[in-house]
Image: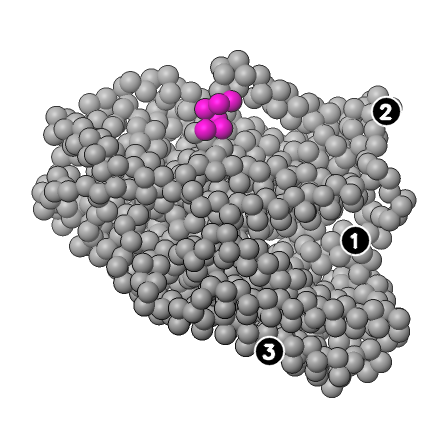
């Protein structure tokens, strides 16, 4: 069948359902595939029934899906990221199990294993790391810079909608048809129509294109927010370090997402319209794809890790009760990393035929990035030096990060040498390296941020004991799973192999699968911590809003913050303005006058575009042309109709603001301040007593 | 949000009487510049792809057989004139001329945009008759990945002109509509800029090196 002669349902038929495969040929491979599809279906049914049972559809629609509040959008991003994280971790465990079942073929078929590593990579990067990073940023950035929302609240909602609908396509691919087997990089010509005529690469393409649009718009939104909406007096050199990393990240998104969009769309042109961008014949050139993809791909890893650096910077400063050491050098280092990240993409394909000179240039550029990163590590350690250190959960993540991340970074410097890279290229050494930077770097940072800002979002702290258990499980699980891969990688075991023969790999594979199970336990422990924390929330409430003796503006407002964040936009006079205010006893001022506040009204456009883009992707994947055209027209129409809506602002009267704010100020004055010895005790209601020892 | 009494955005002159259009316009216009930067990266990459694929003709027809410079010249004149008419609409906005003047210049711009598209499509069909279809070679794929992408932007601009023309009549000269007029003008000039790149790199470059 060709694209032009497909019928009413395109190329969709009953064979696309995995259950058909199970009935025709029951084996371990089909059972795993059907279990995965079953988990998706059971998950959907469970969510729908719970929502119906507790009559939550109305509140869900009114308070969440149509909300343009950056805090709620941030929380929805994080929930989505954790759901996808669960799938990504499960896939990782299955892959480790497959390789541990060797020597020989294990229990999965090669195709199925290839789908697993393709979805695992795609999900972890695009649908866990990115939404988690920007979920945290959504929640935190406007609060940190003293703004009432992001620059474009509705656009923010649309970004979320597009990211979620693209992520849902990966879930749909479990149940209908199959996903790509071409890895998260989807190199043609393997993913071209000649070698891969099925739907797999098409699921990848459209998920990447749609989420890419959403993510680009997020980058735009945050760049503009931080440039234009900072509170008066917050000059750039007073900007919290975390916001610096987000602005760098946003700039990277603005410039680095287009190459990915171009790569995916040109691949789509090859597959759908028989173009010859990357084909083997008629002048196609797959090296263009490799260059485009990594022109995106390398900035991508920095746009994920920079915000984590920012999170650690805030956490180290807060839990040492000290000003961040070397703020200026950290700003310069962050900017340097952001710029240099565009100059190193070629190190992802040293072995693909460039001259030695070009490889040397890119190898040296890659090694240079280690310098600003090293500056950061020393600055963080100097921040800890003689601080009033508390080993809370975020701090423990930070310490695990400091030690483990340096190993990952150093293995990166090893890989930056093209001659070494020729030896370990495409081995598990590389897999160990990038997991070593992404887990302790990005994921630990995000989990630290989750623990750190959770009380701000919900008004109570997370359970400390289960938090520590989680840190221990992640750390041990990470080390058991990925450190052995360095060794088998050096021994020559290729990555992405569903089958292997050398018996000397076996012990390492066994250790790695045990580690994977510990990581699974860590994931469960995250959920247990959440459950226990919600159950025992009476003992950890901190409504005053400053449980950690915080330094930046977000701690100067109630927890959870009101929809408008700040009753009065603060006047910033210092870096770490709230810490300075507490030292100078000018925190919690009583405003003289209040003003009406305009906030964006709820709108359904983000949700509508989420649903429409989901159907659009599905129609394109399955060649249902009439539907794709119809939905395209509906998307254009929806945007036009929305542009006629002028009733977009909601005014909150000054009187209401005054009442709420004064009630909270009364609570502040009625609460007992606690010092840092009682930070995790029930009496910490979120009012910090200035810790005289720590004044520097 | 409380609006600042003066407009502080340096790039765009909204005119004195729009002093209230202000901070909001400043944020939105800056955001639109950022969007254009991102869009520019798309085009920049497509130019790069085209340059690497000029030689990838695979025995198919090349620039000398396919390109019709007379038509390209006509398209250039039309598009540059349309930039002028958008500029006149902006001047009408700035000097507080009646709303109908803006709508008029929008109408002229729309006609020019549509004639540009008509000529471009005629060119594509003429190329197809000579065997110049994107399925033929990497070079033609790169050409048809880039030039119609610009055409698609012009088509989107035309749709925007129509919608905004209606909004000018229905919603009147509100701050929101004025800020949209400013952004549409930016977008239209951006399309012109890309077209200059296309005649230089795609047509002249193709004829020189292809």
Answer with the quarter of the image where residue B92 lies: bottom left
Residue at the far bottom: name it: B208
- Disc 3 crowd rating (10 Å Cα; few below 14, some 14-19, many 20+) is some
Residue at the far top: name it: A53
Callout 2: SS:
loop
Return the residue nearer the eye: A673 or A183. Answer: A673
- Disc 1 crowd rating (10 Å Cα; few below 14, some 14-19, many 20+) is many
Please state the total of marks drawn on the protein image. 3
Segment tinted magenta in the rendering: A57-62
Callout 3: SS:
helix
Badge 1 vs badge 3, beta-carbon distance below 8 Å: no
Where, quadrant-wise, is the N terminus of chain A in this rendering?
top right
Distance from Cα at disc 2 to Cα at disc 3: 67 Å
Residue at image position (44%, 52%) is: A221
Q: Which residue is mark 2?
A: A25
Question: From where the camera sits, is residue A497 visible?
Answer: no
Q: Is residue A178 left or right of residue A518?
A: right
Residue B81's label in the rendered image is 3
Task: Return the disc, 1 or 2, that comes first in the chain's sequence.
Answer: 2
Q: Chain of mark 2?
A: A
Residue A271's label in the rendered image is 1
Residue at image position (53%, 40%) is: A605
Magenta stretch: residue A681 in it? no
Residue A328: give x, y in percent of width and height.
28, 61
Both on one chain, marks 1 and 2?
Answer: yes
Predominant SS along the magenta part: helix
Q: Which circle, 1 or 2, is nearer the viewer? A: 1
Magenta stretch: residue A58 in it? yes
């Amino acid at each position: 069948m060709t694209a032009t002669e497909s019928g009413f349902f395109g190329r969709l038929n009953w064979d696309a359902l995995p259950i058909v495969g199970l009935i025709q040929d029951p084996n371990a491979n089909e059972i795993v595939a059907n279990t995965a599809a079953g988990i998706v279906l059971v998950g959907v049914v469970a969510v729908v029934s719970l929502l119906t049972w507790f009559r939550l559809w109305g509140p869900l629609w009114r308070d969440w899906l149509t909300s343009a509040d950056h805090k709620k959008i941030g929380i929805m991003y994080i929930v989505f990221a954790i759901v996808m994280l669960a799938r990504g971790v499960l896939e990782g465990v299955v892959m480790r199990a497959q390789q541990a079942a060797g020597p020989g073929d294990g229990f999965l078929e090669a195709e199925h294993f290839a789908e697993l590593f393709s979805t695992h990579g795609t999900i972890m990067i695009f649908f866990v790391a990115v939404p988690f990073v920007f979920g945290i940023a959504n929640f935190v950035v406007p609060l940190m810079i003293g703004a009432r929302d992001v620059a474009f609240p509705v656009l923010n909602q649309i970004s979320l909608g597009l990211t979620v609908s693209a992520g849902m396509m990966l879930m749909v691919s479990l149940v209908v048809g199959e996903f790509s087997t071409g890895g998260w990089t989807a190199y043609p010509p393997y993913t071209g129509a000649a070698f891969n005529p099925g739907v797999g690469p098409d699921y990848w393409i459209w998920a990447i294109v749609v989420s890419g649009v959403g993510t680009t718009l997020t980058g735009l939104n945050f760049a503009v927010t931080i440039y234009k909406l900072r509170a008066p007096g917050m000059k750039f050199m007073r900007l919290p370090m975390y916001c610096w990393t987000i602005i760098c990240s946003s700039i990277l998104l603005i410039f680095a997402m287009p190459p990915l969009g171009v790569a995916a769309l040109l691949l789509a042109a090859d597959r759908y319209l028989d173009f010859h961008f990357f084909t083997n014949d008629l002048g196609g050139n797959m090296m263009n794809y490799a260059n485009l993809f990594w022109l995106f791909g390398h900035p991508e890893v920095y746009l994920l890790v920079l915000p984590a650096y920012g999170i650690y910077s805030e956490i180290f400063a807060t839990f040492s009760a000290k000003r961040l050491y070397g703020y200026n050098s950290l700003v310069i280092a962050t900017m340097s990393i952001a710029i240099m990240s565009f100059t190193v993409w070629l190190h992802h394909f040293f072995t693909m035929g460039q001259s030695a000179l070009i490889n040397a240039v890119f190898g040296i550029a890659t090694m240079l990035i280690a310098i600003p990163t090293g500056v950061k590590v020393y600055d963080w350690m100097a921040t800890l030096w003689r601080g009033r250190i508390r080993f809370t959960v975020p701090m423990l993540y930070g310490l695990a990060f400091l030690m483990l991340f340096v190993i990952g970074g150093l293995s990166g410097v090893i890989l930056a040498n093209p001659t070494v890279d020729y030896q370990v290229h495409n081995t598990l050494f590389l897999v160990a390296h990038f997991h070593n930077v992404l887990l302790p770097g990005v994921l630990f940072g995000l989990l630290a941020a989750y623990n750190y800002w959770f009380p701000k979002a919900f008004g109570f702290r997370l359970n400390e004991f289960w938090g520590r258990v989680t840190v221990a499980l992640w750390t041990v699980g990470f080390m058991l799973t990925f450190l052995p891969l360095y060794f088998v990688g050096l021994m020559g075991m290729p990555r992405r192999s569903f089958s292997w023969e050398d018996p000397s790999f076996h012990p390492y594979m066994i250790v790695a699968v045990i580690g994977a199970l510990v990581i699974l336990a860590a994931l469960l422990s995250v959920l247990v911590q959440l459950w226990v924390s919600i159950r025992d929330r009476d003992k950890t409430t901190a409504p005053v809003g400053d449980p950690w003796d915080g330094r930046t503006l977000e701690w100067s407002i109630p927890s959870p913050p009101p929809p408008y964040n700040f009753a009065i936009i603060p006047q910033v006079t210092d870096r770490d303005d709230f810490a300075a205010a507490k030292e100078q006893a000018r925190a919690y001022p009583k405003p003289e006058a209040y003003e009406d506040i305009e906030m964006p009204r709820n709108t359904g456009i983000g949700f509508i575009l989420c649903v429409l883009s989901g159907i659009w992707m599905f129609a394109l994947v399955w060649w249902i042309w009439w539907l794709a055209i119809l939905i395209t027209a509906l998307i254009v129409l929806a945007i036009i109709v929305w542009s006629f809506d002028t009733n977009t602002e909601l005014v909150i009267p000054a009187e209401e603001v005054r009442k709420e704010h004064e009630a909270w100020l009364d609570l502040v004055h009625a609460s007992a301040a606690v010092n840092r010895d009682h930070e995790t005790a029930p009496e910490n209601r979120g009012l910090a007593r200035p810790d005289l020892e720590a004044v520097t | 949000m409380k609006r600042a009494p003066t407009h502080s955005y340096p790039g765009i002159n909204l005119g004195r009487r729009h002093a209230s259009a202000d901070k909001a316009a400043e944020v939105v216009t800056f955001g639109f510049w950022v969007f254009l930067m991102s869009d520019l990266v798309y085009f920049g990459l497509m130019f790069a792809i085209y340059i690497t694929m000029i030689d990838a003709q695979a025995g198919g027809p090349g620039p000398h057989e396919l390109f019709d410079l007379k038509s390209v010249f006509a398209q250039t004149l039309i598009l540059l004139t349309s930039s002028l008419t958008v500029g006149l609409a902006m001047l009408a906005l700035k000097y507080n001329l009646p709303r109908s003047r803006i709508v008029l210049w929008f109408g002229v711009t729309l006609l020019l945009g549509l004639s540009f598209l008509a000529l471009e499509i005629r060119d594509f069909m003429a190329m197809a008759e000579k065997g110049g279809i994107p399925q033929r070679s990497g070079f033609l794929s790169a050409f048809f990945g880039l030039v119609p992408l610009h055409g698609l932007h012009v088509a989107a601009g035309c749709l925007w002109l129509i919608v905004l023309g209606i909004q000018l009549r229905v919603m009147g000269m509100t701050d929101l509509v004025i800020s949209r007029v400013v952004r549409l003008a930016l977008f239209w000039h951006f399309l012109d800029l890309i077209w200059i790149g296309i005649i230089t790199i795609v047509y002249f470059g193709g004829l020189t090196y292809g």
